């Protein structure tokens, strides 16, 4: 089964948290597919990843760049695993029916948005019922992450 981590944004916006999570994924040798709500959102995140830190470089691409197979990070609104990623990053309450193509899933949701929190709770229950190993991470005051729950506990996001 695919490991699924739910990441509850509370202190920093996605635009600050996502690059750090992707840096860690690349350090671990993972390839990431970042699934967004729209091509425009993917383009926005593409621009962000080029500029978020002048001292850092995250190799990535979007549909208009072509060549997904050459990109360790692919930003898209399509569920197709075009870059053969082993990590799926779900944004904007996106979901996919079949997680088996991935070793790990990171489901990031905005704690300031009641609909996003409710949607994350539903996905947690679905994943738990399907037998996926789950973890729930909450942002700390400094923007890091603290594990708050696992699938074998009664606590959900």
Image: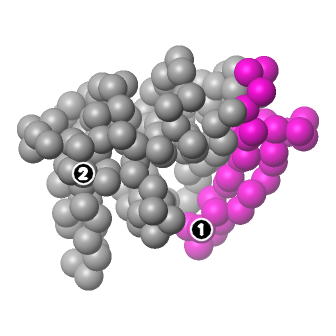
The quadrant of the image that shows the N terminus is top right
Q: Quadrant of residue 116?
A: top right
Q: Residue at x 59, y 68 (%)?
A: 144
Q: Is residue 58 above or below residue 32?
A: below
Left-right relation of 131 to 78: right
Q: Residue at x 23, y 44 (%)?
A: 69
Coloring applied to the structure: one colour
Residue 135 in the image, given as x and y percentages of width and height: 73, 46
Q: Nearer the viewer, residue 99 or 136?
A: 99
Residue 157 in the image, given as x and y percentages of width and height: 72, 38
- Label 2 SS: loop
- The region drawn magenta spans 129-157
Which residue is the site of mark 2?
Answer: 71
Left-right relation of 53 to 61: right
Residue 12 in the image, given as x and y percentages of width and height: 49, 60
- Label 1 SS: loop
Q: Nearer the viewer, residue 133 or 106?
A: 133
């Amino acid at each position: 089964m695919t490991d699924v981590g739910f990441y509850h944004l509370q202190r920093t916006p996605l635009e600050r948290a996502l690059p750090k999570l992707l840096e860690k994924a690349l350090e671990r040798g993972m390839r990431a597919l970042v699934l967004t709500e729209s091509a425009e959102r993917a383009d926005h995140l593409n621009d962000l990843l080029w500029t978020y830190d002048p001292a850092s470089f995250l190799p990535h691409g979007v549909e208009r760049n072509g060549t997904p197979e050459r990109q360790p990070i692919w930003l898209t609104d399509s569920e197709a695993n075009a870059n053969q990623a082993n990590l799926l990053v779900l944004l904007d309450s996106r979901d996919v029916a079949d997680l088996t193509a991935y070793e790990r899933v990171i489901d990031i949701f905005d704690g300031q948005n009641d609909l996003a929190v409710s949607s994350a709770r539903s996905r947690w229950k679905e994943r738990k019922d399907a037998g996926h190993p789950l973890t729930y991470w909450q942002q700390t005051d400094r923007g890091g992450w603290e594990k708050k729950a696992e699938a074998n506990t009664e606590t959900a996001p």
